[in-house]
């Protein structure tokens, strides 16, 4: 198999994008960032362009681009403006691999574009599968493209699945750090502040993703992702809490064997695996230290304290329009919480209410998914005003 070495990094200024560029720099040789995008962090986009010399950059936010002076952009680097620029970059003929690291549903159209063009899609954007899993997987099948997960949990499952055949899988087990509220009581969680929810014990991430970890909505979304990534029914997807974040996920086979992937927590490892698959190449990531004693904890999840997980299994089972509605409601609710408009428990409660009140569509097209996305955001805002 020929190596896929030309890469477009969508969301290059975020944590996943920067980790991807670190990996590309470490790989060296034929690997190259052909295109980079950013939403509004345009000074950082220019700095990265000076460092990596891409052929094309995309400023996805027209308002920010209109106020920005691009004169420091290196000579010969083309630029595009707006969301359509993301699609054009994803479709660029000279790009082999698209790293989809745009946060939220804003990354959906470009992920679909890459899938339709038969690219290798290294997917860090949860929402593409959560919102449009059926459309994305169908597009990949038609084009012959590849889908490689970049999330540490799904990458771990993908790697562990190499130990057996799909018909031999009994279940997959996603691990969760437990977030900042793993040991908190329900009463304590009900009074959680924004600062409390942003104090993640293991990872340094963006504000939205960190809040999702606190509610465990991130794990609910990963359950939905796993349903589409690995073509599994909801009942074959389990979640356990593992606070050390060393065991990244596991696969249990029908004979009772459990195969896990583990490593010190570092997103560069699953990113590199997605870029170099099926090969493994030395990486800059820290390695396990087997010379000292260590212990790892595995704990059952508490659905009563973290009701978001119930939403995840329900959406994974029902499919259709449910993912788009829950995802949009959650994005809006998280923003309302960060602004102090709603309390922490109301994030998931609002998502549940919006899901229950939407008109379910078992086979929505992209236009309907986008309409429901907007509807869910409006509904959560109306609901929050009455709280």
Image: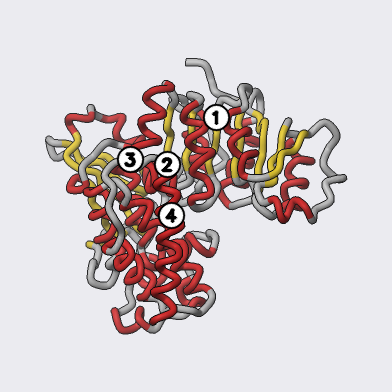
Task: Give the spatial CA distance, label 3 vs label 1.
Answer: 21 Å
Disc 1 to disc 4, C-alpha distance: 28 Å
Q: Residues within 10 Å of mark 1 (few under 14, many from 20)?
A: many
The reply to whether the C-beta atoms of the residues labelled 1 and 4 are less than 8 Å apart is: no
Is there any visible trace of residue 201 in the rendered image? no
Q: Which residue bears the numbered disc 2?
A: 366
Question: Which residue is at a point 23% across and 49% down the rendered structure image?
Answer: 318
Alpha-carbon distance for marks 4 and 3? 29 Å
To which residue does mark 4 refer? 373
The crowding category of the residue bearing disc 4, from other C-alpha atoms within 10 Å (few below 14, some 14 to 19, many at least 20), is many
Q: Colour scheme of this structure image?
A: secondary structure
Q: Secondary structure at mark 4?
A: helix
Of circles 1 and 4, the one toward us is 4
Q: Looking at the rendered structure, which numbered label has been put on residue 384?
A: none
315 or 321, nearer to the observer = 321
The residue under label 3 is: 157
Distance in Å between CA atoms under marks 3 and 2: 28 Å
Relative to 182, is 212 on the left or the right?
A: right
Q: Give the crowd class for mark 2: few <14, some 14-19, many >=20 residues within 10 Å.
A: some
Q: Is residue 178 above or below residue 60?
A: below
> Which residue is at 40% across, 35% downward?
136
The answer to which of marks 2 and 4 sits earlier in the sequence is 2
Label 3 residue SS: helix
Distance between the Cα atoms at labels 2 and 1? 23 Å
């Amino acid at each position: 198999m020929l190596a896929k070495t030309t890469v477009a990094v969508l969301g290059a200024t975020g944590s996943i994008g920067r980790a991807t560029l670190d990996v590309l720099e470490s790989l060296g040789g034929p690997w190259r960032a052909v295109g980079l995008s950013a939403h509004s962090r345009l000074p950082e986009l220019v700095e990265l362009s000076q460092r990596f010399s891409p052929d094309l950059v995309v400023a996805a936010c027209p308002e920010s681009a209109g106020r920005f002076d691009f004169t420091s952009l290196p000579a010969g680097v083309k630029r595009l403006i707006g969301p359509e620029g993301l699609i054009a970059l994803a479709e660029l003929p000279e790009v082999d691999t698209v790293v989809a690291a745009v946060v939220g549903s804003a990354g959906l159209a470009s992920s679909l574009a890459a899938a339709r063009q038969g690219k290798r899609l290294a997917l860090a954007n949860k929402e593409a599968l959560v919102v449009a899993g059926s459309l994305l997987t169908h597009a990949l099948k038609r084009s012959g493209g590849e889908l490689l997960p970049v999330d540490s949990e799904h990458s771990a499952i993908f790697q562990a699945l190499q130990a057996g055949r799909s018909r031999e899988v009994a279940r997959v087990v996603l691990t969760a750090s437990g977030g900042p509220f793993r040991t908190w009581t329900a009463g304590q969680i009900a009074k959680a502040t924004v600062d409390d929810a942003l104090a993640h014990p293991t990872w340094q991430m963006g504000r939205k993703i960190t809040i999702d970890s606190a509610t465990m909505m991130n794990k609910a979304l990963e359950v939905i992702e796993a349903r589409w990534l690995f073509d599994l029914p909801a009942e074959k997807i389990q979640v356990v809490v593992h606070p050390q974040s060393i065991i990244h996920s596991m696969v249990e086979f029908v004979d009772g064997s459990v195969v896990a992937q583990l490593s010190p927590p570092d997103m560069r490892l699953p990113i590199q695996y997605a870029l170099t698959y099926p090969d493994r190449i030395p990486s800059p990531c820290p390695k396990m230290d087997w010379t000292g004693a260590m212990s790892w904890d595995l704990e059952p999840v508490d659905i009563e304290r973290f009701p978001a997980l119930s939403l995840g299994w329900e959406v994974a089972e029902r499919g259709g329009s449910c993912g788009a509605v829950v995802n949009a409601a959650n994005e809006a609710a998280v923003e309302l919480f960060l602004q102090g408009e709603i309390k922490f428990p109301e994030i998931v409660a609002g998502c549940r209410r919006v899901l229950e009140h939407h008109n379910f569509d078992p086979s929505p097209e992209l236009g309907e998914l986008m309409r429901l996305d907007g509807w869910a955001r409006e509904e959560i805002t109306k609901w929050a005003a009455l709280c």
